[in-house]
Every structure is written in structure tokens, then in C-alpha cells.
Amino acid sequence: MTEETAPRAAARRVGIADVAARAGVSLGTASKALNGRGRLREETRARVRAAAEELGFAPSNVARSLLTGRTFTVGVITTDSYGRFGIPVMRGAEDSLAAGEMIAFLCDSRDDPIREQHHLRKLLERRVDGIIVAGRRTDVRRPLGDDLPVPVVYAFAPSGGAHDCSVVSDERGAGRLAVRHLAKTGRRRIAHITGPHSHASARERATGMSEALAAHGLELVGEPFFGNWTEAWGRFAAAQMLRAHPDVDGVFCGNDVVARGVTDGLREAGISLPMQIGVVGVDNWGLVAEAARPPLTTVDLGLEEIGRRSAELLLDAINGRPAPGVHVVPAHLVVRES
Amino acid sequence: MTEETAPRAAARRVGIADVAARAGVSLGTASKALNGRGRLREETRARVRAAAEELGFAPSNVARSLLTGRTFTVGVITTDSYGRFGIPVMRGAEDSLAAGEMIAFLCDSRDDPIREQHHLRKLLERRVDGIIVAGRRTDVRRPLGDDLPVPVVYAFAPSGGAHDCSVVSDERGAGRLAVRHLAKTGRRRIAHITGPHSHASARERATGMSEALAAHGLELVGEPFFGNWTEAWGRFAAAQMLRAHPDVDGVFCGNDVVARGVTDGLREAGISLPMQIGVVGVDNWGLVAEAARPPLTTVDLGLEEIGRRSAELLLDAINGRPAPGVHVVPAHLVVRES
DNA sequence: ATGAAAGCGCTAACAA
DNA sequence: TTGTTAGCGCTTTCAT
């Protein structure tokens, strides 16, 4: 067998005992030195640290956890297969967690309650310190379970449980921001093209829109166009709208995908954007908003911030300071060219 | 304090000792009963199981791990912030891992080696059984570290390490499949619009394309259009191409985003698709491919399969059957209307 | 300032 | 068939 093909021998695991031996101290002393506890001579501390360094010692979190009862680990259960909403939320959560030296298990429940319970069990067996449940719809969801031994924070999709902690986006605020922008840029005849009426987000955004319209002394042109969250629907509805209300000068779209369809539909109908009609979407989904012609002005729901807040609230709860209730993360406008 | 506002008391953790007590057996017996080892009367086994069930007992994986040295946990380090490539790979990996009752820690290195080493250390401290490193470019990457105490599998971005195990997509095969499809549907004057020449994937796909063209006795029309992975580039290049070679009847695009730009560019130049020109992309990125007009025929690189294979190979390595080398996952054509 | 020893929750070898 | 016991790798009293 040549050097070339020989599999590398697995490195033996170095324990704190090895470090202690090399530094010529007892096991307990080594522990104190490495963790900065107890009273030790600075020289000893340094010697131990050096030994640990040389040996490439990585303390076993599992042994430590067994003793302390904390794993510095949380579980994130996402219902949307790492989709449009779960991803930014996860990224934000990881951000906050890393700051607390914690790390996250990722589980995808695919919206299946059975799978969700399975993952819950796996997480509990691993003694996570807490759990974040990230949904994909803004509609209220059933709690993960009752009487769980660890705190839970619901992100994006709020829990229906009375004492639960949820972090959600400001859907109404998004509608208000969008319309306020249209009004401020001089649009007076505003229409609305959005997704399914069965989605809470579509309804809430429309409600926010109505509030803002009223605040500006405006009225919606025609009825809202409820449809689905596709570009094709956006194009179709834009054409229809143009036929029914040729004098529209602003369109608030329920999300960016629809907005992109709307811009395409309008442009292909000979409208010049944003001169004749202003369009505003919701989501600030880079890929869609930036590829649209013109690039979309849109409302960012702050998904990453939802993730960050969720993780922070979870850490607080883990540390004995729970903050039950629904926490709303503000939305903000991202102005591009539409 | 009313029932309504009282915070729910944290449920006390139930241990195997509680189960044993309730079942009226010793601690060791309870363990055997629950794990199906040793010789026990079936009645006893049932009694213990029942007790565990009633108490909602969840065995502590951390205690078990300390003893057995296995955590049934792996780490996934992704370099692309859960982006276009990391996500499907992760989903596939989770798939395979769940089958082995394993669970994954997710870390996002953001392509920063410092952050990567930090995460590596955290994972090692938690005694993961193995690690998957998911990249975002197909270019070769530097190994995670040498002499690591656990097996590592590189997904998508192969490792440069001689004894390492990598799972990659078949970029050349993708180019070949695309051209073969164009040729089979009667296209004879084929052009190529793609991303940056600096990307290995752009070069490899072009190479595969050339091979397939040669196999069909065809020659590329003009030089390949190297640019960037954007729709705007696709539109621009399409117009340019049309001017230089008005008789083109097929375009192989380096990816779906470019392909979508190309279809828009061609359509807006008055070409009817797919009658006059056939277009094929690469990626099968649903969002893009399905929203294009017409929906894109494209090559799927099998990203989820890469994730699944990676996890399987990792599990094999963990179980003492490493399979070093570069494993190629085949691509396949997805026919839509373009 | 340092060492010795107990114990976290579980499994497995050995005794009964 | 069941009970008893010795650790897994570490932290943390309590002695020294």
C-alpha cells in the first residue's frame, strides 16, 4: 500500500486529561484554567492554554451539556422547505444565535404535522435549549405542542396559543407604506392587483392600503383584483384594469411577482413606466424586483429582522425572561424606479 | 394571579429513572426494555414502554452520546447564505439524513474562511459525526482542514484535497443534453449565450455543448456570447446575436436567468417562440423557468440529488466505508415549451 | 493555588 | 430474567 492510496488515520480525540497531563496539572485545574474560573496563577493558566492550543483541544460540548443542562443549541423548524420566507428568517436567526455562541438544528416539516412532531421529538431528545418555528404564511397557526420543556418562538406565522411568543411582519403597514409612496409621487387614481383573497396577507395588505388611501383623501379605482401570486395573473389583470380604467396612474401590487407581471402587462400595452403609471410591490425579493423593467419600488417586510428578533426573544426566554405576545417588525419602503 | 396570566410552569424533565420507578423495575432494565437489548420478559418490556409513553419520556441524546461517542448529528456548512444552490442541496441532504435518524446543524459561512473555521470549531465541539460542505460555485475549493477527526463530504464545489470525497454536478453533460435536445428538435443553426468566462460552470457547459455539436455534425453559429448571469445580458445578447446571425434557429443559454432574458429579447424583436427559435437553459429553477414566455426547456443539474448523495456518502464514511473521489451526479433534461 | 472526588443521564458488562 | 455497577468527559464543590 503506497502513501498515495492509504486512507488517512483518523486523529485521536484529545481530551482535557491530555491537556492537563501535558501542562503537568490536574484535570480540575486544567478545566478552571481553560474556563477562566477559580483562582489560578497566571503562569499556570497560560501553560494550560498553551498545551490545549498545541494539542488542538476542542472541549466536548456533550459532556459539558450533560453536566450543565444547557446545550447552546436551538432547533429551527421551518414549514416551507426552505422557501421564499423561511430562508431570510433562518439567516436572520442564525445571525443572532451565532452572537450568543449558539448553533441551530434545521428541520423541514413540509407543512406536515406528523413530520413536525417527529422533528420536535428529535430536537427534544437532543436537549435543545429552545425552538423557533418559522412558517410561510402569515395566517395564524396551531401551537407546536403544549407544556413543552423548552421555550418556543413563532416566526412569521403567529401561534394561536394565548401565552405564546410570535414575531410577525406588519402587513397592514406594508399596504400603507406602498400607498403613501404612490400618493407622495403624485398618483391619484390608484388600483390594486393582488393574490388570493384566502390569504391573510393579501387581505391585510389591502386593508392597510384602504387606510392610507383614506388618509390621503383618495379612493381606490374599481374593486381590488384578487387572483394569485403569479406573473401571468399580474399581466392579465393589468390588461383588464387598463380596459376598465384607462386613467389609472398608480397600481399597488400585493407582491413583487404580481408587480413584475403588471409592469410587463402595462409596458406591452404601450404604457411607459414609471411616467404614466407608478407601480409598487411588496416583498423586496431581489431577484424579482431587480429584474423587472423598470426595477420595482417595493415594501420590504423585514424578514431577516423577524429572524433576528425571534432568535433574540428566544435567547431571552431561555435566560428566564420570556416575552409572550405578538411582536410586530416594521416594514420599510425600498425605492427603485417603478 | 389568575390562571389566565400565570406563566405556564416549565415541565420537569423526565428521566429514565422516573420511567423505571413507574414501571417498578431497575434503571438498567428500563434501558434495555426501551432499546430492545438484552433478554426481558415481553410483559416487562411492554410495561416499561407504557410507563415511558405515559410520562412522555424522551431519552437524552446527550447522555447517550457521551457514552457511545456518536451524536447522530452532522454539520452542514454552506458558503452561499442559503442561496440558489445551497438550498436544494440542503434539502436533499436533510432527506437522506432523516432516513438515518440524523439531524443537521446548519452554518452559513458567507464564503468567509474565518467564519468557516469558527463554525468548524463549533461543530467539532458538538461532536458531530460528520460534515457536509456545500459550495455555490463549481470551481474547486480548498479543503476544510486536514486531519479532521470526522469525515467530510464536499457538495457541488469539489475539494482540491487528494483523498477527499466530493459530489458534483455534470456540467459538461448539461451542455451536451441541451444541444442534443436542440438538434433533435430540428435546430441546425445554434448559438450560445452564457455567463462569465471566469466561471468554471460557464466554460464546462460550453465544452459539453461543443462535444454535442460535433457529435451531430453541427458547428456553433458565431462565437459564444460570454457575459454575466442576468436577464438584462440575455436580452442584450439576444438582440446582438439576431443582428449578426438572423438565421439562428436555436440558442443554448448558460442558465435559466440568461435564457429568460433571451426569450424576452427575441420575443420583443418579433421572433415567435418556439416556432422560429428554440431556447434551452440550465438550472431548472422553477421560479424563472416557469415564469418565462414560453416556459423554458432546461437542464436540471440534480442539486437535490447531490445533497442526497452527499449525505449518503457521509453516512457511509461515518460507518467506516469511505468513498473518496469525485462523484458525478447526472443532469437531466426538463422539456417545457421553449 | 492546586488536587481529589462526586456526579450529570444514560448504556453495557457483569452478578445474582 | 432482572439488578447492580462502572464509566463516558467534563465542571464543580470541598479538601489540602
Image: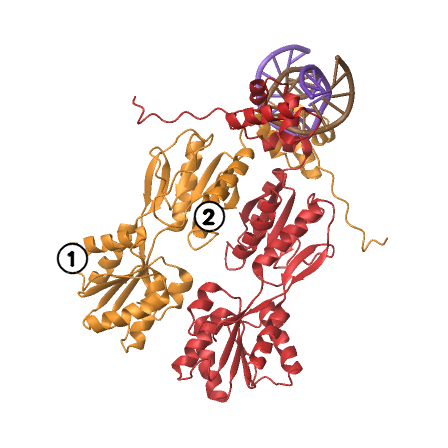
Chain colours: A orange, B red, C brown, D purple
Question: Callout 2: helix, strand or loop?
Answer: helix
Q: Is residue B278 left or right of residue A212?
A: right
At 65% from the left and 85% from the top, the residue drawn is B217
Relative image position of residue A76 (x, y in whole percent): 48, 43
Tag 2 residue: A90
Disc number placed over residue A216 in the picture, else none: 1
Amino acid type indicated by mark 1? His
Q: CA distance from mark 1 to mark 2?
A: 37 Å
Instruction: Identify the image quadrant of residue B273.
Output: bottom left
Report the front residue among A71 and A44.
Answer: A71
Disc 1: which chain? A
Say if A81 sits above or below B102 in the image. below
Relative image position of residue A110 (x, y in whole percent): 47, 49
Please indicate, yes or no, whether residue B37 appears anywhere in the rendered image.
Answer: yes
Relative image position of residue B104 (x, y in whole percent): 57, 45
Say if B302 sits above or below A154 in the image. below
Q: Are marks 1 and 2 in contact (CB under 8 Å)?
A: no
Disc number placed over residue A110 in the picture, else none: none
Disc 2: which chain? A
Please indicate, yes or no, whether residue B229 appears anywhere in the rendered image.
Answer: no
Binning the other alpha carbons within 10 Å of mark 2 as few (below 14), some (14 to 19) or many (20 upward) gives many
Relative image position of residue B21 (x, y in whole percent): 57, 18
Instruction: Identify the image quadrant of residue C6.
Output: top right
Amino acid type indicated by mark 2? Met
